[in-house]
Amino acid sequence: MSIDAVILMLVAMAILWGGLVVAIVRLNRHDLPPLEEIHRDL
Amino acid sequence: MESMSSSVDQATRRGAFSSRKVFILAAIGSAVGLGNIWRFPYVAYENGGGAFLIPYLVALLTAGIPFLLMDYAIGHKHRGSAPLSFARMRRGAEFLGWWQVGICFLIAVYYAAVIAWALRYMLFSLDEAWGDDPEGFFVTEFLETGEPGVSLEVVLGVLTPLVIVWVAVLVIMALGVEKGVGRLSLYFIPILIVAFAILVVRAVTLDGAMDGLDAFFSPNWEALTEPGVWAAAYGQIFFSLSIGFGIMITYSSYVDRRSDMPGAGLVVGFANSGFELLAGIGVFAALGFMAQASGVAVDEVVEGGIGLAFIVFPAMISQAPAGALIGVLFFGSLVIAGLTSLVSVIEVVISAVRDKFEMTRVGASMAVGVPAALMSLVLFSTTSGLHVLDIVDHFINQYGILLVAVVSMLVVAWAMRALPILADHLNRTGSLRLGKIWFALLAVVAPLALGYILVDALVADIKTPYGGFPDWMLAVFGWGGAVGVVVFGLVASLVRWRAGTPLQEPYEQIEEDAR
């Protein structure tokens, strides 16, 4: 494989698979507001 | 307390996902379909190789995920199927939802046929039944394809797996949202990922695999100056994310109100694209092996779509060590990816029918599934199945999915001016704050990009009749299908809603109940 191809493969992996990992971690760390607060906003 | 019991009753009646995890897996199952495996690698290769990553990412972030979040917001806020959610937004917009329902019904009818082919090819892989002529075997021996036209001559080799697929779908749909759709995704999406990962590992360890990956990732930077390449990126993202035709509206209506929907959308968007990258690596590693084994350049063996799956891959399987294993993993992956997408498409129709009429889950599943299965068997288990499928697929994608997406985006953003309200809803519990950038992407960028693709396709189809098929076939199965779903949408929106389905905003209903 050419250097260009290797670099782009690694960049694609880092962005798409890394992005997925970050999105999962972000989702798990996000605290939801209490139910009463959601009701107050209705 | 009364308001709580009202929403709980609705959830019990309509069905719901038991957890955020089940919803996310179901949404990934819907998004990851046949197109991820056989469309993305070819589109990326043809449009700049490694350089395609740039327009692809731009399209994902500026159209794919924003549109996905709009679908989530509509379904999650209005707690209904696509027609009910649109009707709750504005009574006159209900037809958009039924238009989407019609599109989903047509897609389900032909999508099942491709899954049936893949199911049969899983078995063919064991003894490489295609011999040394995979193309002749697929077209002539397996599908028994005749001249373009309509034939009622049944092909038993297609009929049998197609019946199996439809029986499986009917059982899954009758089991309901959580026990059917939810559990299918909960168990089969991890299996799909593991199976495909094994396939990729096997493929990249074949001789010549690096040549294939080199062809796939080598960048052609000049391609980035061509509008067609950017259009291809937006098209790939749009078609692969299952957005704009009711699926994500329906699924998000089954999610608990207290959920981080934007956060879930990011996971689904990146999981879908991550799987496409995995598919690209697996497919091009396999193509590299095949090119080397045949003594030709990689570009001579590259193909996409049905040709890649049922002609090129069988040829590769015949030449590869442990080819049967590769075949079972590849076609098994197609079956799982296809099935989880098919149930999501059918769920759009069942959910709408249940909201509109007084029907049980099993009753609605049969009322929708049996006619769809019969239509599928009549049209696609005959010797003319391949031709009809090719036409319906092309026209319903371009002038069904794409058109309804552009129209609904414009209606929501400009006619209803509903984006700020939808953003407010997602911002209440979301980890991603939506504001003016999101409005601009949905009101301007995405409609322009998708509108360009639509006009480009329309000009091409007017200039040259699609696929060289006879005009009457294109008129009946192509334009006829695309126009038919619009007419269906308008007619269905005139039918009265069942007494137990309130058309006012569900939260207003809750407040009203509380008073």
Image: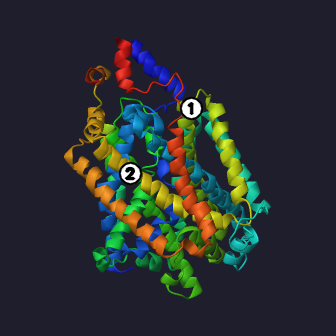
Q: Secondary structure at mark 2?
A: helix
Name the residue tied to disc 2: B407
Q: Is residue B215 above or below residue B120?
A: below
In the depicted structure, whether residue B12 falls above or below residue B140: above
Q: Is residue B107 above or below residue B223?
A: above
**Which residue is more in the foreground, B486 or B263?**
B486
Chain assignment, label 2: B
**Neighbour tally class for label 1: few under 14, some 14-19, many 20 plus, Cα within 10 Å:** many
Look at 42% across and 50% down and name the residue there: B243
B392 left or right of B224 in image: right
Considering only vertical position in the picture, is A2 above or below B471? below
The residue located at (24%, 43%) in the rendering is B434
Seen as rendered, the residue at the extreme left is B436
Q: Residue furthest bottom?
A: B295
Can residue B117 be seen by looking at this rendering? yes
Cα gap from disc 1 to disc 2, whole angstroms: 25 Å
Which quarter of the picture shows residue B110? bottom right
Q: Along the polypeptide, which appears first: circle 1 or circle 2?
A: 1
Quadrant for the C terminus of chain B in the image:
top left
What type is the residue that disc 1 sits on?
Arg
Contact between labelled residues 2 and 1, with CB atoms less than 8 Å apart: no
Callout 2 environment at 10 Å: few (<14), some (14 to 19), or many (20+)? some
Looking at this view, is B202 or B238 the one in front? B238
The numbered disc on residue B354 is 1
Picture residue at 64% right of the left edge, 67% below the top? B387
User: Three-letter amino acid code at disc 2?
Assistant: Val
Of residues B174 and B493, the one nearer the viewer is: B493
Tell me where residue B227 appears, x and y as whole percent.
Answer: 32, 72
Question: Does residue B151 appear left or right of residue B28 in this picture?
Answer: right
As drawn, the label of residue A22 is none
